[in-house]
Structure formats: C-alpha cells, structure tokens
Image (spheres, helix red, strand yellow):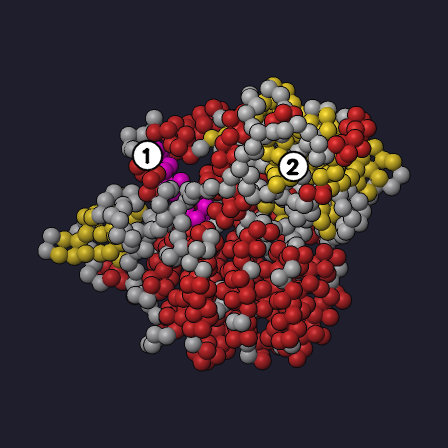
Amino acid sequence: MYERFTRLCATALLALGLGACERPDPVVEPGVAQSLAQARAEVLSAVAYRIALRVPADAGTAITGDMRIEFELAEVREPLQLDFREKADKLLAVMVNDAPSNYRFDAEHLVIPAAELERGANRIDIRFEAGDSSLNRNPDYLYTLFVPDRARTAFPLFDQPDIKATWELSLELPAQWTALANAPLASERRDGKRRQMQFARTAPLSSYLFAFVAGRFERVTREVDGREIVLLHREPDAARLARNLDAIFELHGAALAWLEDYTAIDYPFAQFGLALVPAFQYGGMEHVGNILYRADSLLLDEAPSDEELLGRASLIAHETAHMWFGDLVTMRWFDDVWTKEVFANFMAAKIVNPGFPDIDHALNFLVRHYPGAYSVDRTAGANPIRQPLPNLNQAGQLYGDIIYDKAPIMMRQLEDILGAEALRDGLREYLREYAFGNATWPALIAILDRRSERDLAAWSEVWVNSAGRPQFQLERDARGAQLLQVDPDGRGRSWPQSFTLLSMGDGSFTTQALTVDGPRTALQPPLPAAPGELLFNADGRGYGLFPASADSLRHWASLEPLARGSLLVNLYEQLLTGAGPTPTRYFKALGELIAREDNQLVLGLALSQLRRIYWTLLPENEREASAAALEHTLWQSMLARDEPGLRKLYFDSFADIAQTPEALLRLQDVWSGERQIEGLPLSERYRIKLAQWLAIKLPRQSAAIIAAQLAHTENPDETRRLQFLADSLSPDPAVRDAFFASLAGEEMRTTESWVLDALANLHHPLRVAESEKYIRASLDLLAEIQATGDIFFPKRWLDATLANHHSATAAATVTAFLEAHPDYNRQLRLKILQSADPLWRAQRLRATPQP
C-alpha cells in the first residue's frame, strides 16, 4: 500500500514550503474546537485510515509509521485541518492525492491547502514519528488510550467522535510480542527478530475507540456460547489466574447474551477481545473488540467479598454494554459523553442481577451510586450531568461522579416514569436508527417522549441540565404533615421523583409511597412525633438531602438491609451539613454497629464512613483515645466471622486504622507471614499495600520493610511499581520533598496510578502536617496535569492531595489559590471546589465543639 508513497518521500521533503498561493486560512487554534468539528462533519464522509507502525523493542526508541487517510469531500471551501498535538518535526513527509503537500503546521494542526484537495475522493499519505504520550510504553509492552481526544497525540487524524471511520492496522513488533486490536488478525508472519501482524478492517469507529495493545502477553482463547473470546494477560501467578479465568469468560458471555436480548441487536462487531493490563489508568475502557481492563480489577484475590465480586461483574457488564451504547451508537460531541456512561452503568445494574440472586441489588445500587453522586452535588462545584464543551481539549474535565453515579439514578427515575418495557423499546429504536452513527441526548428524549404523557424535555431540564440536589424538610402544622422540597439555589426547581417513607412508631412499621412532583407533598397521618421514628427514602430510590436523626439507629436490628443503608447515607449527609449528629456521636454509634452487622454491603458502607470520620473529623486527642478500642472491635469482629468476605472487610479497616504498638505488631506479623488468619489469604499485591502502611506507621523500620517486600515480590510489574513508590514512603522529609518535586516532570507522571498511590503515601493522615506544604504546588500543577494526563487524572490528583487534610491553614491555601485565579479554567475550578469540599467541611466540623 505504501510503495509509491515511499518512492515519493524524498521528493516530498524537498517540496515542502513550495506551492501555489492560497486564500487566507481559517482560524487555527489548539485542540479540536466545536466550530471546527462541525465544519468538518458537514463536508467529510467515507473516512478510512490505514496505519502501519514499527514498534522497537526498546521503549526509549521512537515508533515510526506510515498512514493513508482516504475520504470524500462534499466541497472544497477552505484548507483542511488534521489534528496532531505533537511537534512539527515528527511529520516526516506528507503527500496529498499523490503529490507532495505544501502543508503548514500550526497550533496542533496539520493544515492542507485547499488547492491540493478535490471535491469527491481524496487521500493523504503521511510518514511520521508517533507521539508517545498516549501510547503508554513500558519496558516490554504498550497500549493505546485515546479517549477523549488523545489519538491526535500519536498521529494526525480527524479526532472527533462524529467522524467515524474504518481502520486497518499493521504492526511490526519484536518477535516475542503479540498484539490485540479492534478487529481480528488477518495475517501474520515472522522475519528473524520481528513479527508482522496485519489486522482486518474495522466497522466504522470513532477515533477515541481505535486501540491496540502489544507486548509480552499470554493469549487465552475460549469459545463462550458459540462466540470466540480472546484474552491477553501478564499475570505470573498461575493459581491466581486459574481462580479467575472461568468467571471472567462467563461474565462476559452472560453480559453479551443479555444485551443481545435486551437490544434485539446481535453483537455488532467482528471480534470480542480483552486485555488485562497492569496499572491501567481506569477500571476498564470499552474499545471495540479490545476492552482494556486494569488487571487487578478482574483478577481477584482469594476469598473476595460480595462487594468485590459485584464490582467485577458490574465492571465487565459496564464495558460490554458500551459495545452497543457508545460504540455502535456514539455521542455526536463529548458534551453527551455521559450518555454512553449512564447507559453502560444502568445496563450493568440490570445485567448483574441474575448472576447474584442472593444479593440485595437495590442496596448495591444505593451503596455504589449515592455516596459518589452526593459527594459532588453537595458542593459549591456541583455540575450538571450534561455540560457545554467548546473544545475537545477540555473533554476530560467532564468525567466524574455525576456522570457515573448521579446519571444512573436519573435513569432509574426515567424508567419509573416510562415503565421498563417502554424504555427498552425506545432504546431499541434509538440503537436501530443511529447504528454505526452518532446521536444526541435530545434525540433520544424525542424518541422516548412519544412513549410518555409527561413532558420529558422539561423533566430532563432539571435532572440532566442543572446541577445540585433538592433538600427535603418535614413541616407540621394544624393541617397535618407535609414534606417540603427546597431548591438550595433558590431557583424554584423541583426534582420529580418517587420514594418511600417508613414510620417506626408504637412498635410497628408502616410504609407509605410518596410521589414528589412539586414544592409540597402531603403525608398521610398519623405520623410519629419523634424525628427518630421516621426514615425518609427507606427504599433508596429518592435523591436529595433527607431529614434524618441518629435516634433512628435504635431500630437498627429491625430494619431491612436496604433501609439500614439508606439510613447511613442520610445520617452521614446530615452530619456533613453540621445539622445532624456530631462526628463524635456518630463515630461511637458506628463503632457499636459494625460489631454486629452481617450484610457485607452495609458493613462496607459503615466502615468507609467510620474510617473517614476517624482520620479527618475526630480531633487528634479523641482519635488517639479511641484507637485501642476500635482496633480491638475490628480484630475481634474479624475473628468471630466465618465468612471470608466479612473477614476481609474487617481486616482492611483494622490495617488502615492500626496505630497502637500492639496493633502494629499484629499487622507486621500478618504481613511477614508469621501470623496467618484462617480464611484470609493475602495476595502479593495486598502484602505490598500492607508494607506501605507499615512503612509509614513504623518509620524506623521503613527501609527494612520496603527492602523485604521487594525481595519477596515475584511479579516484575509490581516490583517496578514499589520501586517507584519507595521515596514517597521514606521517613526522611527531604527525600519525600524531592520525590514530590520530581512529579512536576511529565515523564514522572507517565504511570498515573503509581503517581496517585504515591500521593496517598505523601498525604497519609499521619503525615498531613508535613505534607500540607505540597498543596499549593499541586494546585499550581493542575492545569498541566489536565493538559498532559488522562481523563480522570486531574480530579484524582486533587482527591489524593486534599482528601486527608482538615486544618484551617490547608483550607485557607485552597481558598487563596482560587481567589488568586479568578479567571481560572471553569471546569478545573469546579473540580477544585468538589475535591476541597471535604477539607472545608472537616475544618468547620472540627472547629465546632462536639458533645
């Protein structure tokens, strides 16, 4: 395909800079502006990419490539911009319609003169050196990750979701490597120390979904329900692999079968494959035919908890659902990126239910989504589900808990309005109409509106296009009791929704279903007089800040697990407002509850709240005074439980909060293997986690602990990770200072999950006084973090930096930064406000006397 292109390369290089006069070029600006994307989408069609990459064995040597871009132009009005966020010298030669191009390179774009283009069929041939920033190169493997607009960091293209294209990939690799791409392998040959792999042409895909993984991987192929599934992995622990492989294949097969039935559309692509990648940035990424997962998200340790099993099943269902919702039908622009995520999450909740018949799925939905959604909607940085996006270089900032947690809650409310069957039929119509194309949320609402008597556009305006959550208040007067729905922003909004109210008075429980569709909702009499006798949102289907009283905890043993979970969520939200139970009182109540709770999901929620209060909301003297008793409760509760999942939950909390010499000695004995706990096997990765905690809590032994752990670590990827983390664990502040300073270099932030682990070490609760000085520097780096990192990195960078801080000076540092940057990027400002909210609340709560 490239013979003529190769012969003309020398001519092209000589010809660059020569050419006919052109009319003035259109505005060229960094990123992919929405105006540029719209203009290109109007004239471009039938786009096809053929890419050949030569990957050297040495990760420090550049990857070179050739590519041909074929496309149709409806008209030639102006120069054509291709997106390439790299240096101009990486463009080695450019040919347009078989002639050397007089292109120019400007503001991350390769600009092709209009005179070189034709109405109808065109082709551009490019020889290039690939940019590395999204190729995730490691010593003996690499993988691409191009969402949302990072394909342009590797090679020139039209990097926008609504220019779908076919892709043909050829890889020249070291002979010992293998690879997985979006389409099946079409041919393969070896030539000495090199391997050539040619993959078939894909169906039309958006650029962010083009992907390959290559390196020293083991390949496993199985047939599941008549469909071949390919899996790549690097797991050296044969026992760990064997424990998990069957479940991984079965869960994918079940998800595919369910989705084919629900959508009435067969799996729409030629290949279904997955790769388990160490230190992958996310839990998973839904590349067509080539889903990438973080390896430890699917390869669970022995005796996993229900929460871990559900988490894996949900992740697999989520990524598989994307094959239809996001891949087959893709959002037109990334302002609707949330649509693919909400459908995937919503479908995942439906898919996992049949596989876990003993699990309370309504409780799982509550635990998985409500704390995360509230963590944003309670803040001054709350953002709507759907947000404007003028340029794709800001698309990564749209991701967050609102997309992944509030949007599924919204979708469940929408299903309640339409009914499950009507929603399913509407989604089937949507998928059929826009298959292999692009759509918008309003287009789907228009389809669903025909199936509902409610004005769904108006409903969507509140739930989707505006930020925040309602606040509910109980009002009693001579006429009876009413539930008030208050818009905290004073805009008079009302969030239509349904949920239940549980009355627990006079020894009997009664439930009434509430449909809230305005500012006031009448409650049926009689109602108990005491606030502690009422539990709002007992079924976990409502959304907002609900009245709650710690006195309700006296009914704990009589409540169903879902109601217990909802009560914990309500109480914690009220605690954070300062109007609910004090941290001291609630901490004591949780300490009593955890000793007798048997439901893993409820226990996990209670323990997460307890740990948060212990480290950030209790004054130091109270924390130190309560440490021994809490350690004893967790240790004894662990030993008293036979169920491995429960034991793991208790032990994880024990290891986190352990501070007394006795507790640390126990923890050290478990880590070293001198003490073994029946039913609690510890993986190599978990022992590394324990080693980090011990290194921080036992500073005099820190170096010896890390050295011992390195000596006993067999997985080479884990060895490299711990070596990276070592300086963040050092007891010497100067070493930690130097390590933090090194994170200013982009090359040090290449493996983002390692960086986040390191920040967690630097900002461990026991070190916050010493690490507070890093806060301002971390905020100063944020804009660069956003520009160079993947989509979740800026928010996670902030969370890892701020989560454990609680001092007035730390809070003032963040406030001062925001005041000093009044014109700061809006989306990043919202992220700061979200991440700093726990810090500000902790500072205020700790400053308030606690009975």
Rendered image quadrant of residue 729: bottom right
Would residue 743 be visible to someone looking at this image?
Answer: yes
The residue most toward the front is 21
Disc sitting over residue 456 in the figure: 1
Q: Main secondary structure of the magenta part?
A: helix
Q: Is residue 393 left or right of residue 62?
A: left
Give x and y (percent) for residue 620: 46, 78
Which residue corresponds to the image point at 62% horizontal and 71% vertical from the top-left? 737
Which residue corresponds to the image point at 38% horizontal and 62% vertical from the top-left? 572
The residue most toward the left is 478
Amino acid type, mark 2? Arg
Q: Nearer the viewer, residue 3 or 108?
A: 108
**678 over 272 or under it: above or below:** below
Which residue corresponds to the image point at 73% horizontal and 61% vertical from the top-left? 719
Magenta stretch bounds: 401-419
Would residue 168 be visible to someone looking at this image?
Answer: no
Q: Is residue 477 magenta?
A: no
Where disc 2 sits, the SS reads strand
Amino acid type, mark 1? Leu
Give x and y (percent) for residue 581: 33, 68
The residue most toward the right is 192
Disc sitting over residue 104 in the figure: 2
Rendered image quadrant of residue 761: bottom right
Q: Is residue 418 magenta?
A: yes
**158 over 584 or under it: above or below:** above
What is the spatial separation of the Cα atoms under label 2 and label 1, in whole angstroms?
Answer: 48 Å
